[in-house]
Amino acid sequence: MRTAVRRVVHGRKPRYLLSGATISLLGYTLLAVLAAHQALAGLDYGVRTWVALLRYEFLNLPMRMLTELGDSLVLVPLIALAVAVLWRRNRRWALALPFLMAGAGVLQYVTKWAANRPRPDQAPWGFPSGHVLSLAVFFGLVIWLVATASRRRRRWRIAAAAVSAAAVAAVGFSRLYLDKHWLSDLAGGLMAGMAYLLLAIWVVEVVIVDRRGPTPPPPHTSG
């Protein structure tokens, strides 16, 4: 892991992180402006109508259960589990993860307040989707950590990316199915979450590592 971090600090990845964060932020800003001017209404209503055709009684409970993955009652235990797993392997991120997710919660509040866009059921604060934003941050970090942990184990990297992306997509679809969000709300949550995550990775793995230097490896014990 430390070797991978040094590659991040001294290679081209800092530039990629900031470029990705900038592109994601621009994407979010564009979506926010278009949503505010109802420029995406045709697409949003079209997707809502299509999803309504997929609603069946036997799917209601599974979709309600699936959408809870993005709720704090499920997300907090997931964060605690991730911290426990990271504690011995990557203590820097074990300490940073709770602050990262708390910041994602603040970001949700600020962006929802700024947009003040109603949901399909007319409940307030629909844009961006908080469920998608939080899960994009959490599972996006999972993908990053697995991808940078080792250049080997390509199957693990592919599996982590596939499972994480599927989790975000499934919860996003459940929000559409339950009529809690427009499609543009989900896209806004994804863009905001990715911009925030990439900037956070840059801070933790570039700025902090540059200031403190790489953590020395633990003493080797034989036997």
Image (tube, rainbow, N blue to C red):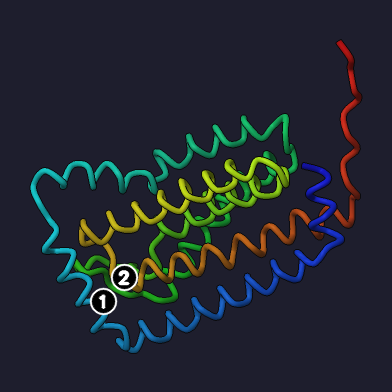
**Mark 2 neighbour density, 10 Å: few (under 14) some (14–19) many (20 or more):** many
Instruction: Place residue 218 in its image quadrant.
Output: top right
Image point (39%, 48%), residue name: 70
The front one of 54 and 74 is: 54
Callout 2 touching callout 1 (CB < 8 Å): yes
Relative image position of residue 56 (x, y in whole percent): 9, 51
The front one of 212 and 6 is: 6
> Disc 1 on helix, strand or loop?
helix
Q: Is residue 136 left or right of residue 22?
A: left
The front one of 198 and 102 is: 198
Which amino acid is tagged 1?
Asp
Instruction: Place residue 34 in its image quadrant.
Output: bottom left
Q: Relative to residue 70, is residue 210 depicted above or below? A: below
Q: Relative to residue 50, is residue 45 depicted above or below? A: below
Q: Relative to residue 190, is residue 164 depicted above or below? A: above
Q: Is residue 22 left or right of residue 104?
A: right
**Image quarter in which the N terminus is found:** top right
Q: Earlier in the sequence, mark 2 or mark 1?
A: 1
Q: Which residue in the structure is indicated by mark 2?
A: 183
Image point (47%, 70%), residue name: 111
Q: CA distance from mark 2 to mark 1?
A: 6 Å
In the image, which disc is placed on residue 44?
1
Image point (27%, 72%), residue name: 118
Which amino acid is tagged 2?
Leu
Q: Is residue 98 left or right of residue 193?
A: right
**Mark 1 neighbour density, 10 Å: few (under 14) some (14–19) many (20 or more):** some
> Disc 2 on helix, strand or loop?
helix
Relative image position of residue 52 (x, y in whole percent): 13, 64
Image point (49%, 37%), residue name: 78
The front one of 183 and 158 is: 158
